[in-house]
Amino acid sequence: MAGEMSRRDVMKLAAAGAIAAATSGLDSALAQAESFPATLPDTWANGKYTLPPLPYAADALEPLYQARALEIHHDKHHQGYVTGLNDTMEKLSQARSSNNYSDIRCLSSSLAFNGSGHVLHSLFWRSMSPQAARGEPVAPSDALAAAINQSFGSFDACRSQFAAAAKEVMSNGWAILAFEPLSSRLVILQAERHQDMTIWGVRPLLVCDVWEHAYYLQYQNRRAEWVDAFMRLANWQFAGERLRPSAAGAES
């Protein structure tokens, strides 16, 4: 009858409304994401992973982290993970094109290893502060301080646990302060290599590299001294910037 909507019309309107709502929600999420600081710039461009420049001069962390050690670590080791990651992505593309997945186990391992290495090193450079190297305090933001107190009891307890975790990583790996979204609390993780022993979904806030290539040129086998130096360099302001989108996401 004229003036009455058919069942098909109703379904079309409902579908259109659902699409509009989804689009609106996506736009809102993207707008929210864009409002947060870009804490990992220059890590991807033109369809390729890229080596981000150091966010400070190579000698800005001396004497706690010597320029030569920093340059080798950044220019050689981090670049190696970027190159390995791009090579792996290309090989995975070729595997899809040929429908030949005979190397999928090796490629999946390489993707996790090099991808995690790229992410963690990109975080690592910003986890250290020239201001702290000069002996000037770099205090956590109010939000980060509150999260630390809630999760660890005090800032000193957080620092002590982080340093202990870094010093006791088995072989090569990382100590990672991260936001855990299920509990909306912070956790401190050890990572072996780059990708092992994580919790899915956490957001790293501050990371310390305890692979020997990170410190051996300056500290040789004295990892504990390197970790103590890192704790003096720690950029708690950066960690607070990394926390903001995590905390906001947990509240929404």
Image (cartoon, rainbow, N blue to C red):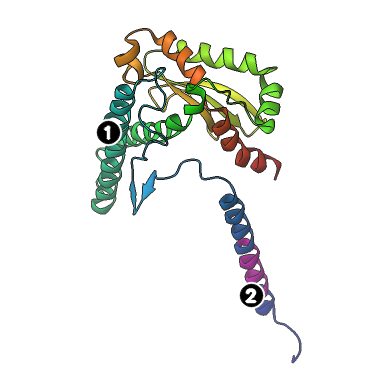
* Residue 153 on the magenta segment: no
Q: Nearer the viewer, residue 89 or 244?
A: 244
Identify the amino acid type marked 1.
Gly
Quarter occupied by the N terminus? bottom right
User: Is 115 drawn above or below residue 221 in the view shown?
Assistant: below
Quote the CA–CA distance across marks 2 and 1: 52 Å
The residue positioned 27% from the left and 33% from the top of the image is: 80
Magenta span: chief secondary structure = helix
The residue positioned 35% from the left and 30% from the top of the image is: 58
Instruction: Check disc 2: other Cα within 10 Å, few if <14, some if 14-19, many if 20+.
Output: few
Quadrant of the rendered structure where residue 162 is?
top right
- Farthest-out residue, bottom: 2
Q: Which residue range is magenta in the image?
A: 13-22
Q: Which residue is mark 2?
A: 12
- What label does residue 80 carry, if any? 1
Instruction: Check disc 1: other Cα within 10 Å, few if <14, some if 14-19, many if 20+.
Output: some
* Residue 18 on the magenta segment: yes
Residue 115: x, y in percent? 37, 36
Quarter occupied by the C terminus? top right
Residue 191: x, y in percent? 45, 22
Q: Is residue 74 left or right of residue 195?
A: left
